[in-house]
Image (cartoon, grey):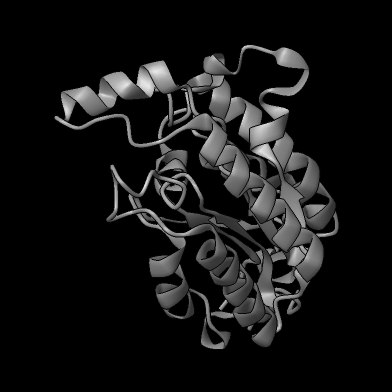
Amino acid sequence: MISWPRIVLFGDSITQFAFETNGWGSILANKLIRKCDVINRGLSGYNTRWAKLILPRLVSKGCHAGNTAAVTIFFGANDSSLKEENPQQHIPLEEYVDNLQSMIQYLKSIDITGDRIILITPPPLYEPAWEKECHLKGCKLNRSNERAGVYAKACIQVANECGTEILDLWTTMQEGGQDFTLYLSDGLHLSDEGNRFVESQLWQILERKASDLPFILPYWNDVDSLNPEASLLHDKKTES
């Protein structure tokens, strides 16, 4: 069997929706075709307490962990929910930190090194738009941008302490006082512009990790049409 290297996207709804049309995950997958599989393991509504429990069932040594080029861990939008308005998804800040650390430690235990782990902070929240969504569902505003920022800073601290990569969306989307609302479709989830922004920022990290990955199987015009076996069956490096 020919084994493709893989990048695993692990997160909440912002990751689950990443393979929709113009989604950040689908853009990455297109860039990496014939070099690396991009696998979406986004789970809408999940927080780090639940993510920590299921990660070993999604990524394990038996699933070619050694052939994993990168794993993104993109949680915090649900964890940072206001406890009084959304107790089901809210995770206390200290536990959020512990859960991130636990997931990183697990990945390292199956030989996925820190340089292949990418933490992504929650993006900023535009409260007026998200409040409208909450009212449509019959509830009060259950998140705040300030609180998302607190969790983002904690995520950055974990990455620095654990030696992983970090993509700080909360800061970069608001940098220089820019209008970050353009990046959001409903105040929380990404718009097309937001998806392009996330992909471009993440690609700056992933490109370094994917630069040495070979193009799997030859270009069609490099195949010897008179003796295709010589072109297609001689390279055992990508087989397992």
- In front: 16, or 96? 96
- Left or right relative to 152: residue 161: right
Determine the image quadrant of residue 165: bottom right
Determine the image quadrant of residue 199: top right
Q: Is residue 39 visible?
A: no
- In front: 60, or 237? 60
In this picture, is 178 found above or below 197? above
- Left or right relative to 108: residue 25: left
In this picture, is 185 found above or below 145? above
Instruction: Say which residue appears at 77% left-offset and 63% top-offset.
Output: 164
- In front: 98, or 237? 98
Which quadrant: the N terminus?
bottom right
Instruction: Say which residue appears at 60% left-offset and 64% top-offset.
Output: 97
Q: Is residue 156 visible?
A: yes
Instruction: Say which residue appears at 17% left-offset and 23% top-offset.
Output: 136
Residue 225, image x, y percentages: 68, 55
Residue 109, image x, y percentages: 66, 87
In this picture, is 213 found above or below 190? below
* Residue at the extreme front: 84
Which quadrant: the C terminus?
bottom right
Residue 190, image x, y percentages: 48, 28
Residue 172, image x, y percentages: 72, 30
Q: How many marks?
A: 0
Determine the image quadrant of residue 43: bottom left
- In front: 155, or 183? 155
Instruction: Say which residue appears at 33% left-offset and 50% top-offset.
Output: 45
